[in-house]
Amino acid sequence: MSEPLVLIAQQGAVRTLTLNRPKSLNSFTGEMHDELLPALETAAADAAVRCVVLTGAGRGFCAGQDLADPAVAPRGEGQPVEVSEVIERRYKPLALRIRSMPVPVIAAVNGVAAGAGASIALACDIVIAARSASFIQAFSKIGLLPDAGGTWLLPRLVGRARAIGLAITGDKLPADEAARIGLIWRAVDDAEFASEVAAMAERLAAMPMKAIAETRAQIDAGMLTNYGDAISAEGRRQGELGKAPDFAEGVAAFLAKRAPVFKDR
């Protein structure tokens, strides 16, 4: 039997999903999609999972879509490739699942994240990159535009000027510079990368899950509405969270000057 294209490991409350096509820098194929989305769905449904880490095997995180994959490989003159179908059927469900997970998702970018691989990394809640890693909006090099949510994410993360510059030039962006301009959360030395990711995952796994999920949802929604409506929406979500056991536990722990033990999910 062939080796899985997505490796699944559990350490405590942290589920790690590792893209496993190292010889191809973990570029996406239909078969990899068939394993990754169900792995995320399974993690979302498992009460024992309180944080998900998405990373890549070998020296790359994900080089984007494998252009040799039959779904996108050129078929000759008069036989156009329906890239839109691949985006709608594969990348949209994947990106939306990541953005709606009931637990925080960390992208542990161990190497290059290019094209759709960069978009999927940036869709995660926290992006931690090894200092040797890089991000490349490679689409213009093959006559395409950023997809898998890239055109939505880039300007919101780094502003219009940088988004257009990165998308048009396709220049390699080192991890340090990506952190400096706010594209990612943090770049860390390669020697400390694994321990930094593990520490962040453990930290997030101990936090209140519903509050994290609602925070993500409200920040995303707030970018599409006006200030007053955002405040009202915050109030509605806060009202729901205020009735949950994690809020009572958080207040009790604060008053008792002890560490809280959150259990909601």
Image: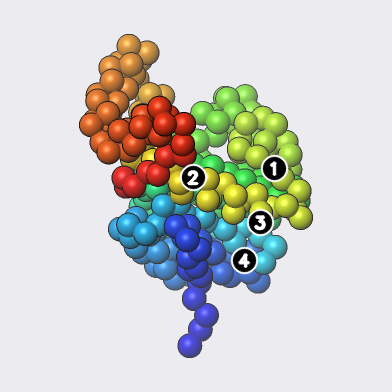
Q: Amino acid at mark 1?
A: Ala
Q: CA distance from mark 1 to mark 3?
A: 12 Å
Tell me which numbered mark, 1 or 4, is placed earlier along the sequence: 4
Q: In front here: 68 or 110?
A: 110
- x%, y% of residue 165? 65, 31
Q: Which mark is residue 194?
A: 3
Q: Is residue 145 visible?
A: no
Figure check: 20 above or below 212: below
The kind of secondary structure element at disc 2 is helix
Indicate the quadrant where residue 178 lies.
Answer: top right
In the image as oriented, which residue stretches furthest toward the bottom? 1
Tell me which numbered mark, 3 or 4, is placed earlier along the sequence: 4
The kind of secondary structure element at disc 3 is helix
Asked whether, in this view, residue 237 is left or right of residue 179, the answer is left
Q: In front here: 253 or 9?
A: 253
Q: Amino acid at mark 3?
A: Ala
- Tell me if mark 3 has few (under 14), some (14-19) or many (20+) residues whose alpha carbon lies within 10 angstroms of its own: some
Tell me which numbered mark, 2 or 1, is placed earlier along the sequence: 1
Q: Amino acid at mark 2?
A: Leu
The kind of secondary structure element at disc 4 is loop
Give the residue at mark 1: 187
- x%, y% of residue 245? 27, 38
- Tell me if mark 4 has few (under 14), some (14-19) or many (20+) residues whose alpha carbon lies within 10 angstroms of its own: many
Give the residue at mark 2: 204
Q: CA distance from mark 2 to mark 1?
A: 18 Å
The kind of secondary structure element at disc 1 is strand
